[in-house]
Each structure stands twice: as C-alpha cells, then as structure tokens.
C-alpha cells in the first residue's frame, strides 16, 4: 500500500480542552452537529416491564432494573433513562429519538440495528454493548467508560465522543462521517474495513489503533498522534525500522 493511501490529514493544533472544540471543523474536516435536546417534563415510567415493539413517549425511567427484558423494536421518544440497569437488555431494532441515557450500566446490552437520533449518552458504564448494524445520527457520548463496543457495519453521522474511555471499540466495516473524539481515550480500536469522512481524531487524549490503520483516509490527526502511530503505519506499509 502506498503512503498516499493512508490519506490522514495532519494538524499541529492544540489537542485538549476548549481549544479542541474551537478547532473542530477547521481546515480539512467538517464539524459534527451535536444534538440539541429540550425534553418536556417527563412522566414516571410505571409499566413494569418493557414490551417488544412498545411505544414509549415522554417517559422517565429512573433507577429501573431492566436486566434481561425485551424491548426489541420499541420506540422511545422524548424519554430519559437515568441510572438504569441494562444487563442483557434486548433493544435490537429499537428507535431512540430525542432522548437521554444518563448513568446507565450493564453488560451485553443488545442494540443491534437500532436507530439513535438526537441522543445524549452520559456517564455510562457499559461492556460488550452490541450496536452492530445500528444507525447513529446527532449522538453525543460524554463521560463514562464503554468496553468492547461493537459497532461493526454501523453508520455514524454527526457523532461526538467526549471525555469518555472506549476500550477495544470495533468499528469494522462501519461508516463514520463527521465524527469527533474530544478528550476521549480510544484504546485498541479496530477500523478494519471502515470508511471515514471528516473524522476528527486530534482531540483524542489517547489514540491506539489495533487494526485497520490503513483505513485512516478521511481522518484528521495531530502531528504528535502521527508520530505515535508511526510504528503501526510502518508495519502496515512493510517498512523496516532499525537503529
């Protein structure tokens, strides 16, 4: 593979804090559009259990234990899930619209092929979350830690990861457009087969790419990040480095 195929735009700008947010969308990259949520006063959810293909409008799920429940295909509009347990919760093909998920926690939450539009996910503690084949548009992920996030084949447009830790996220075959990483630790990321457009990595506090470094075309990195990635890039290009 020729060096030109990597195609990442290199910036020498400041990498952290407010300077990053002002720099986002600068030369070579378009800024992501963030969700602007104004939830109406919610009513407390008192339905007991989630239902497949359920319809939830203007509800607040507070400290609910949704472990193992099935809300596949359900629609959540103007909803707030706060401090809920989502261990093994099935939300595949669900639609989360104009909603907030705050302080949710769980392992193995299934959101495969779900749609998240105008959603804020804050201070989450999640592991093994399945979002493969999902569509994320105008989504903000702020704070918290997500281990082994599966976004294979997903479509991300106008998504911001801010102040969070992503451990071994899998973007294999995903399409990322106008995606920003701000003060976010990206550890062991898999970009195999991914397509990137206007992806801003300059603000990542840590940037580790385990696989798919050849898919960085369409991304922006800082000079310091490029130097950190040099060994991986050299290995990808078959360049031997000695001395």
Image: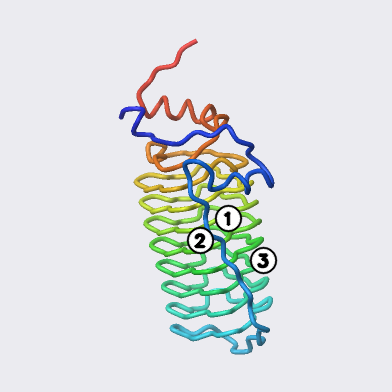
Q: Secondary structure at mark 2?
A: loop
Colour scheme of the picture: rainbow
Mark 2 neighbour class, 10 Å CA radius: few under 14, some 14 to 19, many 20 or more = many
Residues 138 and 170: in front is 138
Query: Which numbered tag is attached to residue 103?
Result: 3
Q: Which residue is mark 2?
A: 129
Asked if labels 3 and 2 touch by Cβ distance under 8 angstroms, the answer is no
Q: Residue at x 53, y 63 (%)?
A: 139
Q: Residue at x 39, y 40 (%)?
A: 217
Q: Nearer the viewer, mark 2 or mark 3?
A: 3
1 to the left or right of 62: left
Query: Which numbered tag is attached to residue 146?
Result: 1
Residue 80, image x and y in percent?
62, 76
Query: In the image, is residue 176 above or below residue 14?
Result: below
Mark 1 neighbour class, 10 Å CA radius: few under 14, some 14 to 19, many 20 or more = many
Going from N to C along the chain, the mark reached first, 1 or 3, is 3
Mark 3 neighbour class, 10 Å CA radius: few under 14, some 14 to 19, many 20 or more = some
Going from N to C along the chain, the mark reached first, 2 or 1, is 2
Label 2 and label 1: CA atoms lie apart by: 8 Å
Q: Quadrant of residue 63?
A: bottom right
Label 1 and label 3: CA atoms lie apart by: 12 Å
81 to the left or right of 131: right
Residue 169, image x and y in percent?
49, 50
Q: Residue at x 57, y 65 (%)?
A: 35
């Amino acid at each position: 593979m020729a060096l030109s195929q990597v195609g990442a735009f290199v910036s020498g700008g400041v990498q952290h804090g407010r300077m990053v947010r002002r720099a986002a969308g600068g030369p070579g990259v378009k800024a992501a559009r963030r969700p602007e949520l104004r939830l109406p006063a919610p009513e407390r959810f008192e339905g007991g259990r989630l239902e497949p293909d359920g319809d939830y409008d203007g509800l607040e799920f507070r400290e609910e234990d949704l472990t193992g429940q099935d809300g596949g295909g359900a629609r959540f509009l103007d909803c707030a899930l706060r401090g809920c347990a989502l261990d093994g919760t099935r939300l595949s093909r669900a639609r989360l619209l104009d909603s907030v998920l705050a302080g949710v926690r769980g392992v193995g939450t299934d959101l495969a092929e779900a749609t998240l539009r105008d959603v804020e996910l804050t201070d989450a503690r999640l592991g093994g979350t399945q979002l493969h084949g999902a569509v994320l548009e105008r989504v903000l992920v702020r704070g918290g830690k997500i281990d082994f996030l599966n976004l294979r084949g997903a479509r991300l447009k106008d998504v911001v990861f801010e102040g969070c830790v992503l451990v071994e996220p899998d973007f294999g075959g995903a399409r990322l457009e106008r995606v920003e990483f701000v003060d976010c630790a990206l550890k062991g990321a898999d970009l195999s087969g991914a397509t990137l457009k206007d992806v801003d990595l300059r603000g990542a506090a840590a940037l580790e790419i385990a696989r798919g470094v050849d898919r960085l075309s369409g991304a922006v990195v800082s000079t310091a990040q490029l130097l950190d990635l040099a060994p991986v890039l050299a290995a990808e290009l078959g360049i031997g480095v000695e001395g």
